Image (spheres, rainbow, N blue to C red):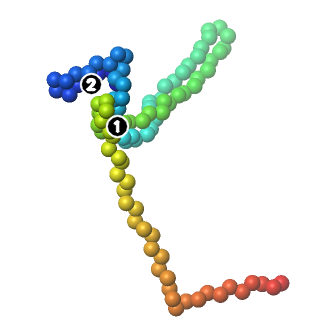
Amino acid sequence: MLLLGDGADVTIGKPFIEGARVLVTAKKNGRGDKIIVFKFKSKVRYRRKKGHRQLLTTLSIDKILPPGVEAPKPVKKARRKKTEEVKTGEIKEEKADGA
């Protein structure tokens, strides 16, 4: 981080601010627009056409932390516990073929 300002308090990094952090969340992953790369040499029938799509990630800035401030612990989402129903009246027996 090069510059951090909070009201009248401004910190300028030389070349960056030691210990300052940015908390972000990745919102979506995708691919950019297609770019055509066309190579051509005249008089020798040399033509090459190739496409390229850059991978992109969209980020959302959640919080900017100044030096010396601890990041809050991420809250884990509670998972539902899977419950299995046990049927007490049914017993299955499998017979193996002896042949």
Q: Which residue is mark 2?
A: 4
Q: Residue at x 40, y 62 (%)?
A: 79
Q: Residue at x 35, y 32 (%)?
A: 21
Q: Nearer the viewer, residue 55 or 70?
A: 70
Query: On the image, which quarter does residue 61 sit in?
Result: top left
Which amino acid type is marked by label 1?
Leu
Work out whether residue 38 can be spotted: yes
Q: Label 2: how many residues lie within 10 Å, few (<14), some (14-19) or many (20+)? A: some
Q: Nearer the viewer, residue 62 or 59?
A: 62
Which quarter of the rendering shows the C terminus?
bottom right
Question: Which structural element holds mark 2?
Answer: strand
Q: Do the numbered discs 2 and 1 sit on residues whose CB atoms are within 8 Å?
A: no
Q: Is residue 98 left or right of residue 81?
A: right
Extreme residue toward the bottom, this view: 89
Whole-percent x, y for residue 24 in the image: 35, 38
Q: CA distance from mark 2 to mark 1?
A: 14 Å
Q: Is residue 30 left or right of residue 69?
A: right
Q: Residue at x 52, y 91 (%)?
A: 89
